[in-house]
Amino acid sequence: MTTIIPFTPSIVPGQPPFTFQCTLDGSLYNCTVTWSLYGQRWIVSIVDQSGSLVVRLPMVGSSNGQPIANLSWDPGTGNGGVVTATTGAPHFLRLGAVVVLSISGASPGGYNVTSPVVVTGPSTFTYPLAADPGTAVVPGQYSYDVDLVRGYFLSTMVWRIANSNIEINP
């Protein structure tokens, strides 16, 4: 389940920094977001319950998802199958590139993944999916998410710049 934290910082001198608590990999952490005058960006510091700094890193924003027009599963010839996603508008990803995208909001939910995809056309990409999730009723959306805590936690932390929310997934 995704935890949404509205990011409402202040850069007014004398105002306290933006703080929140979050659960990452099942443990509670205290997070503080400050403005870096030198770097001209937000910096998040994650501290454990004993007060030890775990990581301090810049906040890099992710865009909101873009709509998918159609999803279809093909059983292929090997292990599992392949999903072809068709976007309603050009996605502007480089043909032949392998990019990690998040697919969300699709129904049935078996289509929802964060996975490497292969860009096969100006408005198509494919990704592996072991089992047939059924006919896509709602195709959902795709997004390129910058996981702020990748490499430090298995949980994910994504800052959506369009709505200024921080999304945390266990």
Image (cartoon, rainbow, N blue to C red):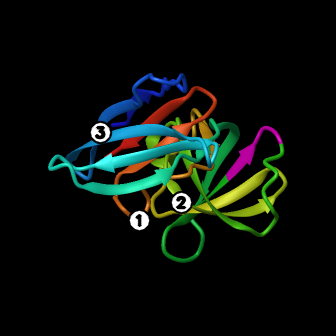
| Numbered tag placed on residue 115 in the rendering | 2
Badge 1 element: loop
Q: In the image, which is nearer the foreground, mark 1 or mark 2?
A: 1
Q: Quick one: label 1 or label 2, which is nearer the N terminus?
A: 2
Residue 152 at x, y percent in the picture = 36, 62
Residue 19 rendering spot, x and y as whole percentages = 36, 32
Residue 18 within the segment the image draws in magenta: no
State left or right for residue 2 relative to residue 113.
left
Q: Is residue 135 visible?
A: no
- Which badge, 3 or 2, comes first in the chain's sequence? 3
Mark 1 to mark 2 CA distance (whole Å):
16 Å
Q: Amino acid at mark 3?
A: Cys
Span colored in magenta: 85-89
CB atoms of marks 1 and 2 within 8 Å: no
Q: Which disc is residue 7 wearing?
A: none
Residue at numbered disc 1: 151
Please report the residue visible at 62 percent of the width from the left and 35 percent of the height from the top. Answer: 64
Q: Residues within 10 Å of mark 3 (few under 14, many from 20)?
A: some
